[in-house]
Image (tube, rainbow, N blue to C red):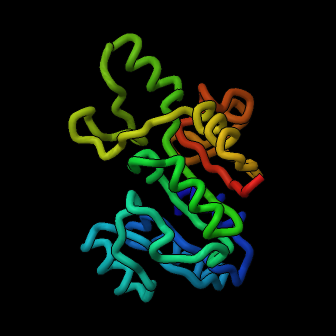
């Protein structure tokens, strides 16, 4: 299991109600169900990935996150609303973050950090948009439409009135380290945040 998903697992209380946005094939929900006895749902747009969730015994709803969460769930429906490496692919990330902390007591978000030093070098020296393990697409075929840095994300949280409860910055192998804690915006390839309403 990826270390960023292990970090998320460490933050989840056993027996919690969890919603996973852009859940893919429900690997995280299956892991949390088996290790933490959580109950929950996944939201996913891709039909093939939906089928994998159903095969794995996870309740899943086909939904486009850009249309919001309120049609599906009431405020306070979940203990945690999780979104891993999907925020940057949504049209209105600020609206989605607000809904996440309304529907869930806490929100957990991961995203690729555009401020990572290798991204900066590719852009500055090569004059082209970065292509890395965390951002494996070309500029013309990427699903990522709202890339941000750690600083950008924290500024948005402040603007939206979201309190950051925990933060882990990880590298391309999803490991955390001292340099990433000292210079997160420069040294971290991906970020993992736990949030609540301030």
Count of numbered labels shown in the rendering: 0
Residue name at image x 58 percent, y 62 percent: 100
**Residue lying farthest top?**
125
Residue 97, position as x, y percentages in the image: 57, 54
Residue 168, position as x, y percentages in the image: 68, 46
Answer yes or no: is residue 148 visible. yes
Q: Nearer the viewer, residue 186 or 160?
A: 160
Q: Quadrant of residue 18?
A: bottom right
Q: Quadrant of residue 102?
A: bottom right
Q: Quadrant of residue 197?
A: bottom right
Residue 160, position as x, y percentages in the image: 65, 45
Q: Is residue 196 left or right of residue 113?
A: right
Residue name at image x 22 percent, y 41 percent: 141
Residue name at image x 69 percent, y 63 percent: 106
User: In the displayed structure, would residue 126 be above or below residue 179?
Assistant: above
Q: Nearer the viewer, residue 114 or 170?
A: 114
Answer yes or no: is residue 3 visible. no
**Residue lying farthest left?**
140
Q: Is residue 164 left or right of residue 103?
A: right
User: In the displayed structure, would residue 136 be above or below residue 77?
Assistant: above
Residue 185, position as x, y percentages in the image: 62, 29
Q: Nearer the viewer, residue 74 or 191?
A: 74
Q: Is residue 152 left or right of residue 43?
A: right
Q: Is residue 105 left or right of residue 2?
A: right
Residue name at image x 46 percent, y 20 percent: 120
């Amino acid at each position: 299991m990826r270390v960023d998903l292990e970090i998320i697992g460490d933050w989840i209380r056993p027996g919690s109600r969890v919603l996973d946005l852009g859940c893919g094939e429900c690997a995280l929900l299956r892991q949390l169900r088996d290790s933490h006895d959580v109950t929950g749902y996944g939201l996913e747009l891709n039909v093939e990935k939906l089928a994998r969730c159903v095969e794995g015994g996870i309740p899943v709803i086909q939904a486009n996150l850009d249309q919001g969460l309120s049609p599906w769930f009431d405020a306070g429906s979940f203990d945690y609303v999780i979104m891993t490496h999907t925020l940057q692919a949504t049209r209105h990330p600020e609206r989605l973050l607000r809904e996440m902390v309304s529907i869930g007591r806490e929100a957990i978000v991961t995203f690729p950090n555009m401020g990572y030093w290798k991204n900066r070098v590719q852009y500055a020296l090569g004059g082209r948009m970065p292509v890395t393990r965390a951002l494996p697409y070309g500029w013309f075929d990427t699903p990522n439409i709202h890339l941000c840095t750690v600083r950008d994300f924290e500024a948005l949280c402040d603007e939206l009135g979201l309190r950051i409860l925990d933060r882990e910055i990880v590298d391309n192998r999803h490991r955390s380290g001292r340099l990433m804690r000292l210079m997160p915006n420069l040294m971290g390839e991906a970020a993992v945040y736990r949030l609540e309403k301030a």
